[in-house]
Image (cartoon, rainbow, N blue to C red):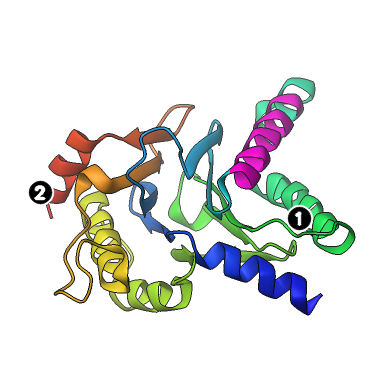
Amino acid sequence: MKDRADYARKGIARGRSVVVLQYDDGIAFATQNPSRALHKISEIYDRIAFAAVGKYNEFENLRVAGVRYADLRGYSYDRSDVTARGLANAYAQTLGTVFTTESKPLEVELVVAEVADEPAGDQIYRLSYDGSVADEHSVVAMGGQAEELGARLREEWHEGMALPEVLTLATRALAASGEGTGDGAEPQEVPAAQLEAAVLERTARRRAFRRLTTPALDQLLAQR
Protein backbone atom coordinates (compact mmCIF):
# COMPACT_ATOMS: atom_id res chain seq x y z
CA MET A 1 0.00 0.00 0.00
CA LYS A 2 2.84 2.38 0.79
CA ASP A 3 4.42 1.70 -2.61
CA ARG A 4 1.10 2.37 -4.32
CA ALA A 5 0.62 5.61 -2.40
CA ASP A 6 4.16 6.79 -3.25
CA TYR A 7 3.60 5.92 -6.90
CA ALA A 8 0.34 7.90 -7.04
CA ARG A 9 1.79 10.91 -5.21
CA LYS A 10 4.78 11.10 -7.58
CA GLY A 11 2.51 10.98 -10.60
CA ILE A 12 0.26 13.73 -9.23
CA ALA A 13 3.24 15.92 -8.31
CA ARG A 14 4.42 16.02 -11.93
CA GLY A 15 1.32 17.97 -12.98
CA ARG A 16 0.65 21.66 -12.55
CA SER A 17 -1.41 22.67 -9.55
CA VAL A 18 -5.07 23.68 -9.51
CA VAL A 19 -6.48 26.18 -7.02
CA VAL A 20 -10.11 26.63 -5.97
CA LEU A 21 -11.30 29.72 -4.09
CA GLN A 22 -14.67 30.92 -2.87
CA TYR A 23 -15.59 34.52 -3.63
CA ASP A 24 -18.65 36.62 -2.86
CA ASP A 25 -20.64 35.53 -5.92
CA GLY A 26 -19.47 31.95 -6.35
CA ILE A 27 -16.49 29.61 -6.60
CA ALA A 28 -13.46 30.20 -8.86
CA PHE A 29 -11.04 27.63 -10.33
CA ALA A 30 -7.65 28.37 -11.86
CA THR A 31 -4.57 26.55 -13.15
CA GLN A 32 -1.74 27.21 -15.55
CA ASN A 33 -2.67 25.28 -18.68
CA PRO A 34 -1.61 26.51 -22.14
CA SER A 35 -3.78 23.86 -23.85
CA ARG A 36 -7.14 25.11 -25.13
CA ALA A 37 -8.49 21.57 -25.60
CA LEU A 38 -7.27 19.41 -22.69
CA HIS A 39 -9.23 20.86 -19.79
CA LYS A 40 -8.51 20.25 -16.11
CA ILE A 41 -11.62 22.20 -15.03
CA SER A 42 -15.05 21.19 -16.33
CA GLU A 43 -18.79 21.33 -15.77
CA ILE A 44 -20.53 18.26 -14.36
CA TYR A 45 -24.13 19.42 -13.84
CA ASP A 46 -26.26 22.51 -13.27
CA ARG A 47 -24.36 23.92 -10.29
CA ILE A 48 -21.53 21.38 -9.96
CA ALA A 49 -17.98 21.58 -11.34
CA PHE A 50 -15.00 19.25 -11.42
CA ALA A 51 -11.27 20.02 -11.26
CA ALA A 52 -8.38 17.57 -11.34
CA VAL A 53 -4.62 17.13 -11.36
CA GLY A 54 -2.59 14.11 -12.37
CA LYS A 55 -2.85 11.82 -15.38
CA TYR A 56 -5.17 13.35 -17.96
CA ASN A 57 -6.69 10.17 -19.43
CA GLU A 58 -7.51 8.87 -15.94
CA PHE A 59 -9.24 11.97 -14.62
CA GLU A 60 -11.00 12.52 -17.96
CA ASN A 61 -12.55 9.05 -17.63
CA LEU A 62 -13.68 9.98 -14.12
CA ARG A 63 -15.17 13.24 -15.39
CA VAL A 64 -17.18 11.44 -18.07
CA ALA A 65 -18.38 8.90 -15.51
CA GLY A 66 -19.44 11.76 -13.24
CA VAL A 67 -21.45 13.41 -16.02
CA ARG A 68 -23.21 10.11 -16.71
CA TYR A 69 -23.94 9.59 -13.02
CA ALA A 70 -25.40 13.09 -12.72
CA ASP A 71 -27.49 12.84 -15.89
CA LEU A 72 -28.91 9.45 -14.93
CA ARG A 73 -29.76 10.51 -11.38
CA GLY A 74 -31.30 13.78 -12.51
CA TYR A 75 -33.38 12.02 -15.16
CA SER A 76 -34.47 9.15 -12.89
CA TYR A 77 -35.36 11.30 -9.88
CA ASP A 78 -35.10 15.07 -9.89
CA ARG A 79 -32.41 17.57 -10.86
CA SER A 80 -32.20 18.71 -7.23
CA ASP A 81 -31.19 15.16 -6.23
CA VAL A 82 -27.86 15.58 -8.03
CA THR A 83 -25.43 16.92 -5.40
CA ALA A 84 -21.70 17.35 -5.02
CA ARG A 85 -21.87 15.14 -1.91
CA GLY A 86 -23.40 12.26 -3.83
CA LEU A 87 -20.92 12.62 -6.67
CA ALA A 88 -17.98 12.80 -4.26
CA ASN A 89 -19.15 9.58 -2.57
CA ALA A 90 -19.37 7.84 -5.95
CA TYR A 91 -15.86 9.00 -6.88
CA ALA A 92 -14.53 7.93 -3.48
CA GLN A 93 -15.84 4.39 -3.99
CA THR A 94 -14.24 4.16 -7.42
CA LEU A 95 -10.88 5.54 -6.31
CA GLY A 96 -10.80 3.39 -3.17
CA THR A 97 -11.66 0.22 -5.08
CA VAL A 98 -8.97 0.82 -7.69
CA PHE A 99 -6.39 1.66 -5.02
CA THR A 100 -6.97 -1.53 -3.04
CA THR A 101 -7.71 -4.08 -5.78
CA GLU A 102 -5.98 -3.02 -9.01
CA SER A 103 -2.29 -3.39 -9.81
CA LYS A 104 -1.87 0.38 -10.27
CA PRO A 105 -3.68 3.21 -8.44
CA LEU A 106 -5.17 6.14 -10.31
CA GLU A 107 -2.69 9.04 -10.41
CA VAL A 108 -5.32 11.69 -9.80
CA GLU A 109 -6.56 14.16 -7.23
CA LEU A 110 -10.00 15.73 -7.62
CA VAL A 111 -12.20 18.55 -6.41
CA VAL A 112 -15.97 18.41 -6.75
CA ALA A 113 -17.67 21.71 -5.95
CA GLU A 114 -21.28 22.87 -5.82
CA VAL A 115 -22.34 26.50 -5.52
CA ALA A 116 -25.33 27.41 -3.34
CA ASP A 117 -27.52 30.49 -2.96
CA GLU A 118 -25.38 31.64 -0.01
CA PRO A 119 -21.62 31.18 0.59
CA ALA A 120 -22.29 29.14 3.74
CA GLY A 121 -24.07 26.54 1.64
CA ASP A 122 -21.25 25.98 -0.87
CA GLN A 123 -19.88 22.43 -0.96
CA ILE A 124 -16.24 21.71 -1.88
CA TYR A 125 -14.89 18.16 -1.62
CA ARG A 126 -11.30 17.14 -2.24
CA LEU A 127 -10.67 13.50 -3.15
CA SER A 128 -7.32 11.73 -3.04
CA TYR A 129 -6.02 8.83 -5.11
CA ASP A 130 -6.94 6.35 -2.35
CA GLY A 131 -10.58 7.42 -2.13
CA SER A 132 -10.29 9.58 0.99
CA VAL A 133 -12.59 12.62 1.02
CA ALA A 134 -12.05 15.98 2.71
CA ASP A 135 -14.76 18.60 3.17
CA GLU A 136 -12.96 21.84 2.31
CA HIS A 137 -13.83 25.50 2.84
CA SER A 138 -12.72 28.78 1.29
CA VAL A 139 -9.47 27.62 -0.35
CA VAL A 140 -8.22 24.37 -1.90
CA ALA A 141 -4.91 23.66 -3.66
CA MET A 142 -4.06 20.41 -5.43
CA GLY A 143 -0.93 19.11 -7.13
CA GLY A 144 2.78 19.00 -6.49
CA GLN A 145 2.89 22.37 -4.70
CA ALA A 146 -0.37 21.90 -2.79
CA GLU A 147 0.90 22.57 0.74
CA GLU A 148 2.89 25.65 -0.22
CA LEU A 149 0.11 26.99 -2.41
CA GLY A 150 -2.58 26.36 0.17
CA ALA A 151 -0.63 28.13 2.90
CA ARG A 152 0.02 31.15 0.68
CA LEU A 153 -3.60 31.41 -0.41
CA ARG A 154 -4.97 31.12 3.15
CA GLU A 155 -2.72 33.95 4.29
CA GLU A 156 -4.28 36.38 1.84
CA TRP A 157 -7.81 35.06 1.29
CA HIS A 158 -10.65 36.67 3.25
CA GLU A 159 -14.44 36.62 3.12
CA GLY A 160 -16.18 38.97 0.72
CA MET A 161 -13.50 38.96 -1.99
CA ALA A 162 -14.66 39.77 -5.52
CA LEU A 163 -13.83 37.68 -8.58
CA PRO A 164 -10.99 39.93 -9.84
CA GLU A 165 -9.38 39.76 -6.39
CA VAL A 166 -9.43 35.96 -6.12
CA LEU A 167 -8.17 35.54 -9.70
CA THR A 168 -5.29 37.90 -9.00
CA LEU A 169 -4.51 36.02 -5.79
CA ALA A 170 -4.60 32.70 -7.64
CA THR A 171 -2.29 33.80 -10.46
CA ARG A 172 0.15 35.38 -8.02
CA ALA A 173 0.24 32.23 -5.88
CA LEU A 174 0.74 29.95 -8.90
CA ALA A 175 3.64 32.11 -10.07
CA ALA A 176 5.26 32.32 -6.64
CA SER A 177 5.19 28.53 -6.32
CA GLY A 178 7.30 28.17 -9.45
CA GLU A 179 4.39 27.71 -11.86
CA GLY A 180 4.58 31.17 -13.33
CA THR A 181 6.71 32.73 -16.02
CA GLY A 182 10.09 32.94 -14.39
CA ASP A 183 12.52 30.25 -13.29
CA GLY A 184 14.46 31.73 -10.42
CA ALA A 185 13.33 35.22 -11.40
CA GLU A 186 11.07 37.55 -9.46
CA PRO A 187 7.62 35.85 -9.36
CA GLN A 188 5.12 37.32 -11.81
CA GLU A 189 1.46 36.60 -12.39
CA VAL A 190 0.72 33.89 -14.91
CA PRO A 191 -0.34 35.48 -18.24
CA ALA A 192 -4.02 35.18 -19.03
CA ALA A 193 -3.21 33.29 -22.23
CA GLN A 194 -1.64 30.51 -20.13
CA LEU A 195 -4.46 30.33 -17.61
CA GLU A 196 -7.38 27.94 -17.56
CA ALA A 197 -10.04 29.45 -15.33
CA ALA A 198 -13.74 28.98 -14.71
CA VAL A 199 -16.38 29.95 -12.18
CA LEU A 200 -19.56 28.64 -10.64
CA GLU A 201 -21.75 31.74 -10.48
CA ARG A 202 -24.08 31.99 -7.52
CA THR A 203 -26.57 34.21 -9.35
CA ALA A 204 -27.02 31.93 -12.37
CA ARG A 205 -30.58 30.71 -12.82
CA ARG A 206 -29.69 27.08 -13.59
CA ARG A 207 -26.36 26.33 -15.26
CA ALA A 208 -23.85 28.06 -13.02
CA PHE A 209 -20.60 26.99 -14.74
CA ARG A 210 -18.83 29.54 -16.95
CA ARG A 211 -15.42 29.11 -18.54
CA LEU A 212 -13.39 32.33 -18.61
CA THR A 213 -11.86 33.15 -21.99
CA THR A 214 -8.53 34.97 -22.36
CA PRO A 215 -10.18 38.37 -23.12
CA ALA A 216 -12.47 37.97 -20.09
CA LEU A 217 -9.49 37.07 -17.89
CA ASP A 218 -7.52 40.09 -19.14
CA GLN A 219 -10.45 42.33 -18.29
CA LEU A 220 -10.96 40.81 -14.83
CA LEU A 221 -7.27 40.90 -13.91
CA ALA A 222 -7.12 44.55 -14.98
CA GLN A 223 -9.83 45.39 -12.41
CA ARG A 224 -7.85 44.34 -9.35
Asked if residue 103 is among those painted magenta in the image, a careful observer would answer no
- Secondary structure beneath label 2: helix
Residue 120, image x, y percentages: 49, 58
Q: Residue at x 10, y 49 (%)?
A: 222
Nearest the camera: 167 or 7? 7
Q: Which of marks 1 and 2 is in front?
A: 1
- Disc 2: which residue: 222
Q: Which amino acid does label 2 sit on?
A: Ala
| Res 26 visible | yes
Residue projecting furthest to the left: 222
Q: Is residue 214 left or right of residue 186?
A: right
Cα distance in 3D space between marks 1 and 2: 40 Å
Q: What residue type is labelled 1?
A: Leu
- Disc 1: which residue: 95
Q: Residues in magenta?
A: 57-72
Q: Residue at x 21, y 46 (%)?
A: 192
Asked if residue 61 is among those painted magenta in the image, a careful observer would answer yes
Q: Residue at x 66, y 63 (%)?
A: 128
Position of the N terminus, as image quadrant, is: bottom right
